[in-house]
Amino acid sequence: MPDDDLFELRKGFRIFGAVYEKVVTGYVERVNPSHLMQVGIEAMLDELDPYTTFIDESESTRIDIITKGRYGGVGLEVGRRGGKITVVAPVAGASGYKQGVRTGDVITEVASQSTADLSVDDVETLLRGEPGTTVRIVVEREGTPAPLTFTLTREQVDLPDVAYRGRVGEANEIGYVKLERFTRDAPKAMASALKELKAKGTLQGVILDLRGNPGGLLRAAVGVTALFVPQNSVVVSTRGRQDKTGNTYTTGRTPLLPDVPLVVLVNGKSASASEIVAGAIQDRDRGVILGTTTYGKGLVQKVKSLPHNTSLKLTTAQYYTPSGRTIQALNTAARDTSVSESRGQPHETVHGRTVRDGDGIRPDVRVSPPSPSPLESALTRRAAFFRYANHYAATHDTLTANFSVTDPELEAFRTWLDQEGAQYPIQAEQSLDSLRARLRKAGYDDVQDEAAALDRALQETKKKAFRRHASALKRHLKREILSRYVSADRRLAALLPGDKQVEAATVLLGQTDRYRDLLSPSEEN
């Protein structure tokens, strides 16, 4: 470190410490020293990239989830639905799941504290703790007149890296693996899944689903890539401010599937380690990337231990794919990852195809999921599918085998919305309300009849939209209803049929010539 920087570091440390001490001991009103220090640290880090963050003692569980895929808790994923703290999903096998806490349960009390004024983070912190300890929660459940009380035992909760493995295609000839995260055990879990698929018969192709995977450990990404590419292949390199932070990472094992055709599914929520795998597969022309452009997080973070069980997640370098591309998006503000852009410096793959940097990993085959209709968006914003699934679970003890949402069930959903008085205005209705208010303010009372006629037309359009978008609405309902009855892997398996991107990948793997052409330099991406 240059002497001038070292002097400024020591000078700044003394000044900051002095200001902190004077404020804590002499300010006109008492201040919370811990909170004040947290604010000061966060203000300093806000000047840097969004991934450099301070992790205090109460948040240290996040590090175990990122690195190990486990934490001490009761296995309840919670969120806010309709303004209330709600169980989004119990983790199969954990205490909450075993004792009967359900998706949709509203948590009103945790550890003798009302959740009315607590944030989701507050509730998660109270639920987590040392294995062997207990925490009491009170929930409200639709269809149950009195609140339910559960005393849950905290334990080590293991989150699976591989959410699902199975076979797809008309003859079940293609393997499918959904990888949720990149913990240190991810390569082992992936290898186990692939071996299981191989044991069931010859594979004509494999779909690796990295959609929604936010990443994790760099070495886990290298380990997963090593299952598909030749030994000693370069997967990723890092370059940082200091020479010692520049490293090249290569595969260290014989690939498990060196030649089986491969499609990697990505989207705008595939980030970091997911992009390392997708970038390496693309640069080596080992497989086809299908979906939409990835998130574009190409910065390396290292977790630095700090006093009092706190940590600093510090950006120290950037990732580069084997062809020399940076994964980091040049501009992450308001990016539409479903649209192809031609900016960025060109690079070449092993076969001579042109790929570009500066915008995450762009797919070789762009397949966007269907855009939600205004009706779908309005119902999702009001958590209508979620709430109806609670109602359904309260009135149906079990699901039929091979459950599907039928036309009568969709009509029952619409009837329930009317009975509940659920408001789900689409954008056009909101615009009409705004127009009415402006007309009234301007004194144009004589056009209110026309506005009322337009409103009636919109209501009729909404009714027709239930029929026009029936397939998409049924899929939303099926996803939510299944989550009340079956495990996450069974729900995922049930929803694979109808997944447009999985269908596109399956079709591509059946088109040998098309697949080969996509990996040749003559094919336009």
Image: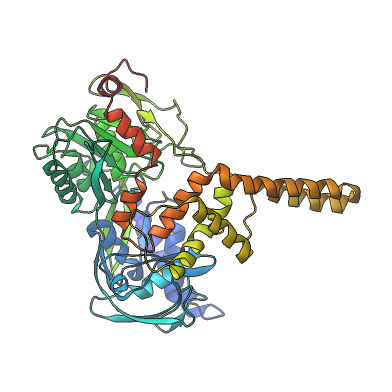
Residue 154 picture location, percent across and down: 27, 75
Residue 373 picture location, percent across and down: 56, 43
Vertical placement of 458 versus 417: above or below? Answer: above
Q: Quadrant of residue 102?
A: bottom left
Residue 330 picture location, percent across and down: 43, 36
Q: Residue at x 48, y 76 (%)?
A: 115
Q: Residue at x 46, y 35 (%)?
A: 338
Vertical placement of 240 versus 302: above or below? Answer: above
Q: Quadrant of residue 66?
A: bottom left
Could one spot residue 321 in this view of the protein? no
Q: Residue at x 87, y 46 (%)?
A: 447
Q: Is residue 334 left or right of residue 363?
A: right
Residues 515 and 481: in front is 481
Q: Residue furthest left?
A: 254
Could one spot residue 463 in this view of the protein? yes
Q: Residue furthest top?
A: 522
Q: How is the image coloured?
A: rainbow
Residues 221 and 444: in front is 444
Residue 451 picture location, percent across and down: 80, 48
Vertical placement of 374 versus 19: above or below? Answer: above
